[in-house]
């Protein structure tokens, strides 16, 4: 898949796409990029599109690290590409971005999927962790270990290196900034504005998102289902890509 760029709100946004058909937009998590979706983009009958959010990967930076700002960029991306009622999938921080998108623009998406996403009440990072977060900016080995921890069952070390390389492209102010943004995030009274189908996926080996958080997301929507995966951690699309595609195809084919 060759990458493309598009101008969104005055900034260049990088993305890759595959296939033809109904659109599926894939939104990565913190320290992520489009690459996290590269093994699950072959969905027969669907046009899958994975972007680098602003501040991440090969896209231009924003002046701030903010979930609503990311959601506004995502909405503009959907509009500029002319995507009609896409299915929007968000991982981790990307789950918060997708939740904000659904609440702010409930007419935009056909369905939402959360993959170990932040709960409507946000995600609190212990204050003592911030000095370590700042070290990730310049310490590739620490970053690699952190990514390994959020994909604990993934065995492909070469792919882990590639994910680490992309992680190191993140804007410097977004390291602590994204954690603070998730602390500020609160959509408990707003998430339910999206009335369409929702699927929540949670890995039982996740060290970041708890089952209670996944169930909080489930409860926020009137038309939602929860799939618990016993043998994966925080990142099903790289830990169990084949099974993840089966889940996603089962969900979208029922819409």
Image (cartoon, rainbow, N blue to C red):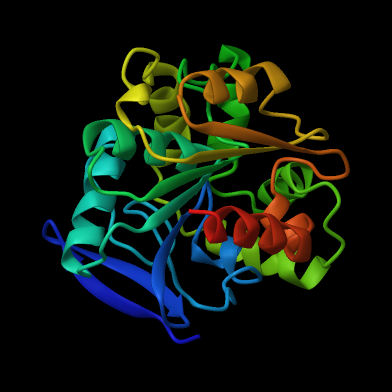
Q: Residue furthest bottom?
A: 2
Residue furthest to the front: 254
Q: Visible in this render: residue 156?
A: yes
Q: Is residue 66 visible?
A: no
Q: Position of residue 194 (x, y in %)?
A: 33, 32
Q: Would residue 206 appear left or right of 104 to someone viewing this image?
A: right
Q: Residue at x 45, y 24 (%)?
A: 222
Decide: is 126 above or below 255.
above
Residue 224 higher or lower than 77, as above or below: above
Residue farthest to the left?
A: 10
Residue 173 lies left or right of residue 234; in this view the side is: left
- Residue 1 position within the rendered picture, expressed as x and y whole percent measured from the top left: 50, 85
Q: Nearer the viewer, residue 136 or 252?
A: 252
Pinpoint residue 45: horizontal percent, then vertical percent.
50, 78
Give left or right: position of 197 versus 101: right
- Residue 134 image position (x, y, % from top left): 53, 35
Vertical arrangement, residue 3 with respect to residue 10, above or below? below
- Please count the marks in the image: 0
On screen, residue 68 versus residue 199, left or right, reads left
Say which quarter of the image contains residue 39. Answer: bottom right
The residue sitting at 43% across, 77% down in the picture is 17
Q: Nearer the viewer, residue 245 or 208?
A: 245
The front one of 35 and 194 is 194
């Amino acid at each position: 898949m060759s990458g493309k760029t598009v101008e969104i709100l005055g900034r260049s946004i990088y993305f890759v796409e595959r296939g033809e058909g109904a659109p599926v937009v894939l939104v990565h998590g913190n320290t992520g990029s489009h690459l996290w979706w590269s093994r699950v983009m072959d969905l027969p009958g669907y046009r899958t599109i994975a972007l680098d959010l602003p501040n991440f990967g090969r896209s231009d930076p924003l002046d701030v690290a903010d979930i609503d700002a990311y959601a506004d960029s995502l909405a503009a991306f959907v509009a500029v590409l002319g995507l009609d009622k896409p299915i929007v999938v968000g991982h981790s921080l990307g789950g918060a971005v997708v939740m904000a998108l659904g609440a702010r623009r409930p007419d935009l998406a056909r369905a939402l999927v959360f993959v170990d996403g932040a709960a409507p009440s946000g995600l609190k990072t212990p204050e003592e962790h911030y000095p370590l977060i700042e070290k990730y900016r310049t310490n590739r080995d620490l970053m690699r270990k952190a990514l390994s921890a959020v994909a604990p069952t993934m065995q492909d070390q070469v792919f882990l290196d590639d994910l680490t390389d992309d992680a190191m492209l993140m804007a410097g102010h977004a390291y602590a900034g994204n954690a603070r943004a998730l602390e500020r995030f609160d959509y408990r009274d707003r998430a339910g504005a999206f009335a369409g189908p929702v699927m929540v996926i949670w890995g039982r080996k996740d060290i970041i998102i708890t089952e209670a958080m996944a169930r909080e997301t489930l409860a926020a929507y009137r038309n939602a289902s929860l799939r618990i995966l016993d043998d994966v951690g925080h990142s099903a699309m790289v830990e169990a890509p084949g099974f993840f595609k089966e889940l996603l195809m089962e969900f979208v084919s029922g819409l």
